[in-house]
């Protein structure tokens, strides 16, 4: 009698547990298990992280800010400059949680494990430039934290295309593999090859519209990547204000390295520059082809300016 009663009680408990696990909406294709409950799970993980804090009070926490892109827009420079602030803890590597299924399927616990240890007063930041152009990422980020602050750094679209090509070209050179000239990618049957992926990544208005379906523009701060290269301090000041950080980064934290041709960082008496792979010279491009490139981006750029309510000094 006792055993049958116990079995009935156990069955009731299991039934209740199953009912609580039913998602609030049907899972969409590509959703990780429990994705509709992501925000609640994120809050739980944050609490658990603090409970298991190290003796000095530091713990891993989910990012409150993500640098979402754009590829070859200056994301590494932005992260390094932002890391000068004592209240910022930055993930060292590109995490690719929201855009790579093999990572996303492992859940927020895995994502939390990729974050640096930080104190309660610090802001955790991660950057993965591929997020900006990945269609499924905005909804996934919103499901984790609809109040997150997003940083987007953009450059002149034509220059970004050339940087994109240059990076892949040098990757092949290092592996001693041949790689076609940029003209072979940009031109197809005498016309601009609009199927070239690097061109698509520079259609900023298309990708931003996808993000604006889930986040208001006030949640996305756009950093002018060209100005960041020429004069970094004013741009970083704007980022500090957007993230509600106290003004800790100073003009003295930057100095122009004539040998490298770009600004380097000075942090507590220690000088450091970006990796030698940054700031590489672009390939020589026929001026007529460059003009076609500028023409191609003219209308998309206008649409982007209208979308964000500001202009940029692009061709």
Image (tube, rainbow, N blue to C red):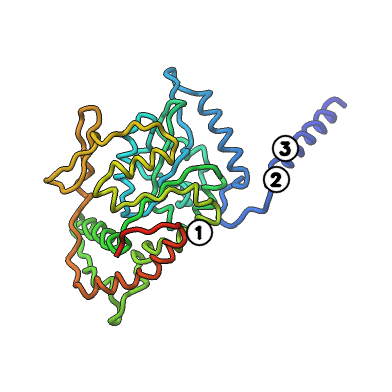
Q: Nearer the viewer, mark 2 or mark 1?
A: 1
The residue beneath circle 2 is: 22
Q: Nearer the viewer, mark 3 or mark 1?
A: 1
Q: Label 3 vs label 1: CA separation?
A: 36 Å
Q: Is residue 149 left or right of residue 291?
A: right
Q: Residues within 10 Å of mark 1 (few under 14, many from 20)?
A: some
Q: Residue at x 24, y 68 (%)?
A: 182
Q: Position of residue 74 (x, y in %)?
A: 31, 50
Residue closest to the eye, 155 or 189: 155
Q: Earlier in the sequence, mark 2 or mark 1?
A: 2
Q: Secondary structure at mark 3?
A: helix
The residue beneath circle 3 is: 17
Q: Position of residue 53 (x, y in %)?
A: 48, 23
Q: Residue at x 38, y 42 (%)?
A: 239
Q: Secondary structure at mark 1?
A: helix
Q: Label 2 vs label 1: CA separation?
A: 28 Å
The quarter in which the N terminus is drawn is top right
């Amino acid at each position: 009698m006792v055993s049958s009663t116990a079995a009935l009680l156990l069955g009731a408990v299991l039934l209740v547990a199953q009912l609580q696990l039913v998602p609030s909406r049907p899972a969409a294709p590509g959703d990780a298990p429990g994705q509709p409950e992501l925000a609640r799970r994120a809050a739980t993980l944050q609490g658990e992280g603090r409970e298991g804090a190290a003796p000095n009070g530091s713990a891993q926490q989910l990012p409150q800010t993500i640098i979402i892109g754009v590829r070859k827009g200056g994301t590494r420079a932005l992260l390094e400059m932002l890391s000068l602030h004592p209240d910022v803890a930055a993930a060292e590597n590109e995490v690719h949680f929201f855009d790579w299924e093999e990572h996303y399927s492992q859940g927020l616990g895995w994502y939390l494990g990729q974050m640096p240890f930080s104190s309660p007063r610090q802001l955790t930041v991660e950057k993965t430039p591929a997020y900006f152009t990945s269609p499924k990422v905005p909804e996934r980020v919103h499901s984790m934290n609809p109040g997150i602050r997003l940083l987007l750094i953009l450059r002149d679209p034509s220059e970004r295309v050339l940087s994109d090509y240059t990076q892949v070209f040098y990757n092949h050179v290092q592996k001693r593999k041949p790689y076609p000239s940029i003209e072979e990618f940009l031109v197809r049957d005498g016309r601009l090859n609009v199927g070239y992926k690097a061109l698509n990544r520079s259609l900023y208005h298309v990708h931003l519209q996808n993000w604006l379906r889930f986040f208001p523009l006030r949640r996305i701060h756009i950093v002018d990547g060209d100005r960041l290269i020429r004069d970094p301090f004013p741009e970083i000041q704007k980022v500090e204000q957007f993230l509600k950080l106290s003004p800790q980064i100073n003009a003295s934290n930057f100095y122009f390295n004539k040998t490298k041709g770009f600004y380097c960082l000075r942090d507590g008496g220690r000088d450091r520059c970006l990796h030698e792979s940054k700031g590489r010279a672009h390939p020589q491009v026929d001026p007529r082809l460059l003009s076609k490139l500028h023409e191609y981006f003219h209308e998309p750029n206008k649409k982007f300016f209208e979308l964000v309510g500001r202009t940029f000094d692009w061709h």
